[in-house]
Amino acid sequence: MTRPGPRVRGARPHWVPVSLLVLTLLTIAMVVVAIGVIFDFVPAWAPQSGASGSDFLTLANKALPIGSSLVGAVFIIAIFRRWAAKGGTHLLVWGIGLVFFATGSFTEALHGLLGWHDSIFRFWYLFGAVLIAAWMGQGTVHLLAPVRWARMIGALLSVASLYAAYQVFTATLEPRLLASDVTAMATDADATADEVLAGAAALLAPTGLDQRGQPDRRRLTPLARTVASAAGRRGVSVPSAVLTESEHSLNLVGTVGDSQWMLGTEAWLAQHGAVSGAATSGLHEEKWSLWVARNGRVLGRLVLREPVVFSGHVIVSSGVRILTPFFNIFGIITLIGGALYSAWVFWRKGILGHRAAGNVLIAGAAILGGGASAFSRWGMLVYLYLAELSSLILMFIGFLIATRSTRPAATPAPPVGHAS
């Protein structure tokens, strides 16, 4: 640390210590949750209903990412202008992290405007879910850590990021797992829509059971919750099923009483010997359809609504989603921890109170951004994009406050701190 700067009025806001205590506790809780995700012991809550929400929420989830993209673009320009004026590897790396943030928001906006595309999702997951926090945190490492350590950690992060990119862009995706509603049902002549829906709900329900056969809502995909919700709205009685075969929690075979039921894509059911009846023989595979068969005969299909927002549930390849908490733990510790440490240093020395306040806002924004990831994982998808936009705006405000110019009586070098 360098020597303290001049003491100025308002350099020790009274609210800073309490804020730092609260944010520190939240940061610890986030690290515990992230570790719990890795070892699969964190309880998770998810709504029974689908993620479609009201028309207003659907419109909001299309508009909010556009707002995040625009705010992100302004933020990127501001931070790169400061880097051009002052230099500093930390500003450059923070700028890269913000480019990742804006990329994630832009892909969310594209999804809202164009609908589902696998490539758009892959860019979102890599930049929007995996890399943001880690690269923003790496900027803080370059600010606070010795140069040698910062460069070594940066090299390791770069290699890990390339590995993550390979994993994400080669992963198998199944977008039906993110279906946000059941919009229609096509049935065979001797089957009813309720039978088709009940069979689908019965086969999907066991996918939410743990190894002991107990309900574990962390395992329920958005598709399973969506079909269960549709059955509930229609008052359909869902029988109990025992799964005998499961592929990606989507293509399923199970028994209900004395009957064998199958749920899956048309091609998968055909491979398993299911044949179409008179009313379904003319129907063809659609991207957002799931087919239901009983005792080898196709009864009908569910027509699904594509996802309103992105979620990692779409990835069915193993070893991909587990990468996210490792990157995020690094980002939590470095980005949030660095901001809290810097705010405390400025406040304790009674200097540059605007930097203490700005760093508190930056830490709070990063915590809110981490909460956005939790909303996605726990099924509260209607809040995801609102939390992202709020986090970005709050971080931008914190950056502007922390970097505003002052005119002290003397100008000794300020202590090392965030957003310098």
Image: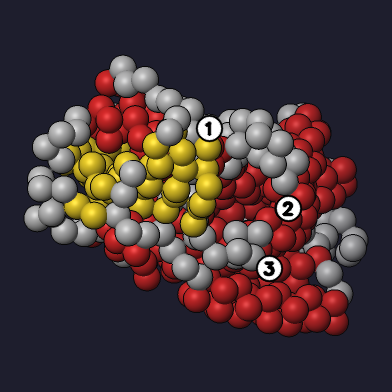
In terms of sequence position, does the residue under pointer 1 or pointer 3 come before the other?
1
Instruction: Give the residue number, with chain letter if any, for mark 1.
Output: 46
- Judge left or right: residue 338 versus residue 233: right
In terms of sequence position, does the residue under pointer 3 or pointer 2 come before the other?
2
Instruction: Give the residue number, with chain letter if any, for mark 2.
Output: 38
Estimate the x, y position of residue 173 in percent, counting from the top left: 44, 63
Q: Is residue 155 above or below residue 240?
A: below
Based on the displayed image, in which of its 4 quarters is residue 44 positioned?
Answer: top right
Task: Name the amino acid, label 1.
Answer: Ala
Residue placed at 19% from the left, 33% from the top?
191
Residue placed at 64% from the left, 65% from the top?
319
| Numbered tag placed on residue 139 in the rendering | 3
Task: Name the amino acid, label 2.
Answer: Ile
Q: What separation in Å lies between label 1 and label 2 (alpha carbons)? A: 19 Å
Estimate the x, y position of residue 343 in percent, counting from the top left: 77, 47
Quadrant for the C terminus in the image? bottom right
Q: Does the CB distance between marks 3 and 2 fall below 8 Å?
A: no
Estimate the x, y position of residue 134 in percent, counting from the top left: 66, 64
